[in-house]
Image: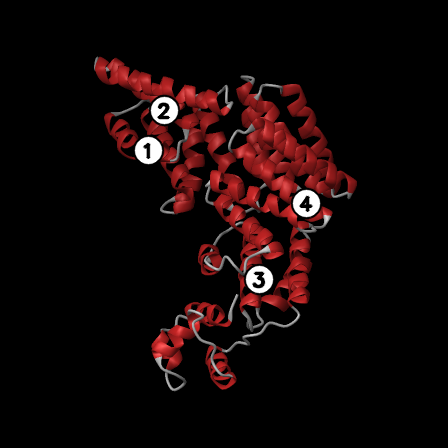
Amino acid sequence: MNLGEKIRYFRRVKNLSQQELAAGICSVPYLSKIENGVTEPSEEIQQHLAERLGIKLHAKNEKSIMQNYVDLFYSLYMRDYPTAKQKYDNLIDLPSQSVEEDILNKIFKSMYIMMTTQEIHGVPEMLDEVAYIDDVIKGEKAFYYFLARSQLSFYIEEFEDSHNYVLKAEKLLEEHRFQEWERGYLLYMVGLTANQLFKNIIALEYTQLALTIFEKTYFFKRCADCRIILSIVHTRIKNFDESIKQLLLAETIANSFGDEPLKGIIYHNLGSIANHKGEKEKAIEQYARSLKAKENEPLVSKIMTIHALIKSYEKTNQPEKGLQLLNTWMKEVKDNPIYKGYELHFLYYKELFTHGELKESTVQFMIKEMIPYLKKRNEWIFLAEYYPLLGKYFENQQKYKQASMYYNFAMEAMRNMYDLGVTYI
């Protein structure tokens, strides 16, 4: 990155116009030439510009700076959050004196926020600020930039983007020397995102590779994470015995460490297996255990289980329990864009539990709000669930043309599910 690009970068970061930066130092056209690399300013002008920006234009010990941030991420990777906080406080509050420092600061601050809070407040803005500097974000910086982007996309449920970012990071494994634990985390992320996209073979392959690394380094909690992914894939292909086996191995680890949130994830997936086997009451029991174990976790960790339990109450005709659960959590998802999909699902079930059947108002809500949202996001599993309900409603109303249309939509959604490798709702 040349001198002019560094000046332009910090001017934008600090939200200064060219007029504001150049005032009393040089002319605006001359600053423009500097930023575009047309001319090299004198040492005196460089010094004045740097002082006004509050930076140093020439980075020192970049390798040492990078290592400090990698050490921070290692603590996050190990889930040693007290140590990570100490390292974070020592690094993040220091003013960035160079472009390289500022980029690293934003990348690793983003990952710290997401991995410790499971929230994304301020993260998109930070990553967007560094996104356009392609010639600086290379090598190890690029590896972590792609990981941060993947994490952000994952949290906002843009799973295709999340998967593509980790595939970009994977290419850098071949071009640069990374430690085994960095490789393990990257392989885990590929498996995790592939699982969300129902890429079963890729999910199994990469997760098994990550598991091998985690077992070799005795990082048992990450081993449990991998076994949960393997279990989900085996559930998807109806290999329930293998799925349960993987979860029980993960549960042994969770019990050894007294890890309640991990137990919550395991119980949720045991509930999912019970549900797919038609063991509805057992599924409810496991989902309830999951919510109990996740009691102190943020909403993002509980929302899938809440939704699954609500659906289970509907399947077992327990509207009172369903409404009680909805009334507890509805306010938490209302008007939050991250939980927009869940808000729509919850509104549907609240109407259903209240009236006992589909009403015209509920149907119009589904057609005007819920279905368009799900179609936009290609949520074929949910569409395959809701379309037949609309078809049945219009059939009962003797509106056969509309009924036929929604039944056809349901068949299309089912075909898309099968293309993804999903064989159940």
Give the number of the mark in front: 3 or 2.
Answer: 3
Judging by the rendered image, the residue that carries numbered circle 1 is: 370
Q: Position of residue 320 (x, y in %)?
A: 42, 29
Q: Are the residues tagged 1 and 4 within 8 Å (C-beta)? A: no
Give the number of the mark in front: 4 or 2.
Answer: 4
Mark toward the start of the polypeptide (2 vs 1)? 1
Against 185, residue 392 (above or below) is: above
Q: How many numbered discs, if any?
A: 4
Judging by the rendered image, the residue that carries numbered circle 4 is: 183
- Asked whether 323 or 307 is in front, the reply is 307
Three-letter code, disc 1:
Met
Mark 2, secondary structure of its residue: helix
Q: Are the residues tagged 4 and 2 within 8 Å (C-beta)? A: no
Direction from residue 395 to residue 267 in the image, left or right: right
Q: CA distance from mark 1 to mark 3?
A: 40 Å
Judging by the rendered image, the residue that carries numbered circle 2 is: 386
Three-letter code, disc 4:
Arg
Instruction: Tell me if residue 285 can be seen.
Output: no
Q: Residue at x 70, y 42 (%)?
A: 221
Direction from residue 113 to residue 328 in the image, left or right: left
Q: Residue furthest front?
A: 38
Q: Are the residues tagged 3 and 2 within 8 Å (C-beta)? A: no
Q: CA distance from mark 1 to mark 4?
A: 40 Å
Q: Are the residues tagged 2 and 1 within 8 Å (C-beta)? A: yes
